[in-house]
Amino acid sequence: MRSKVYFIKVNNSDNIEVIKKKFALLLDKSDTLGFIRKDDLAVVKMHFGEEGNTGFVKPEYVRLACDRILQKQATPVLSDTNTLYRGRRTNSKDHLKIAREHGFTKESTGAEVAIPDETKKKNVAKVALNGKFIKSAKIVKAFLDADAIVDIAHFKGHIMTGFAGVLKNVGMGCATREGKLAQHSDVSPIVHPDNCVGCGACKKVCPVKAITIKDRKSHIDAKICIGCASCIAVCNYYAIDVNWDAGGVTIQEKMIEYAKAVLKDKTEKAAFINFAIKITKECDCLAKDDPRIAPDIGIFASRDPVSCDKAALDLTIAESKIDIFKEAHPNRDGLRQLNYAAEIGLGNLDYELINLL
């Protein structure tokens, strides 16, 4: 049986007010949030954008989803997790600050913004999965504890996964930093000795004593390392990082297994929304105003994350006349994530597109 994907066209010339009206129509006609009940805690999974980035889904649009959750006498909370890479979203304090700077406040969206501090054990949970790659997924607990998840994603390119939409927003976006590291790379981070000054900050925060200082350089014992990524966060010299190339082949399937871990108990309590607007070559983690690589397509809404991403991918390629994501990232095949998601039961590749305009 084909899954339903609701779609409304957005043009490059549409301003914020026009897009708001279109998104409101999409929400009301599709009843995508119809599963939310009174007193539900609905976590709205967001990406608040790195400093200087403008591609993230605007708070004015998110407000419309939050209003509909509030109308059901449920409670919306906007949330995301902290990042592996260097930037202002590495820790909860700075992450919350940049979310506010980008306009995500309770006053503007109708919802509190929460970035759980995963350095506190109470905010982290392990989900038994026994997948091909992931046996136990490390997830920020707030997403598991919520009664409902509303996944609002900016559909765009990505250097590691070809493209990124609702599946990546959940699979990568709900993982702890340790979980992100497991998806991106081998478990152990790597040291760039030319940058290392031997200050010992990484050694002090390592919870398993996997780091030693030899000849004024840090050394990480991969056999001891648990991949918590605390050393990456504390280093001020960009000397410790993820081995980004190491996970290039398997990252998509690991990400999908993480998505399954997040959604396994939310089969009837999750909604997925892709904003295929200002489609960029890279994700919103870039601290710059990445230019468009495709025309604006529109907004997609579905209860099926696989169909939601597949529809956005198909229409973007059709409107662009070429596979812009393959052209931008020739070494990545974004279909890998969709095929694997369908294979492990996250959704359908076949969909019925319901055009509302």
Image: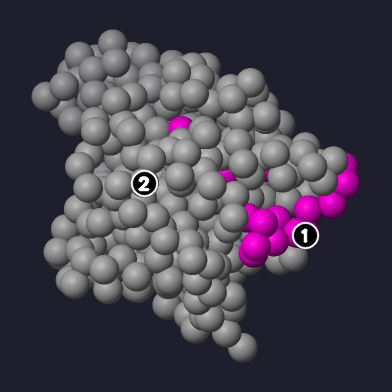
Which residues are drawn in magenta?
A: 27-48
The foreground one among 135 and 92 is: 92
Residue at label 2? 14
Q: Can residue 42 be seen in the rendering of this structure?
A: no
Q: Is residue 28 magenta?
A: yes
Q: Is residue 162 magenta?
A: no
**How far, Cα to Cα, is label 1 from label 2?**
30 Å
Q: Position of residue 279 (x, y in %)?
A: 29, 51
Badge 2, how many Cα within 10 Å: few under 14, some, many 20+?
A: few
Give the residue type at disc 2: Asp
The residue under the point 51% across, 43% down is: 20
Residue at label 1? 35
Give the residue type at disc 1: Phe
Which structural element holds mark 2?
A: loop
Q: Is residue 112 left or right of residue 338?
A: right
Q: Can residue 57 be seen in the rendering of this structure?
A: yes
Q: Position of residue 157 (x, y in %)?
A: 28, 54
The image quadrant where one finds the N terminus is bottom right
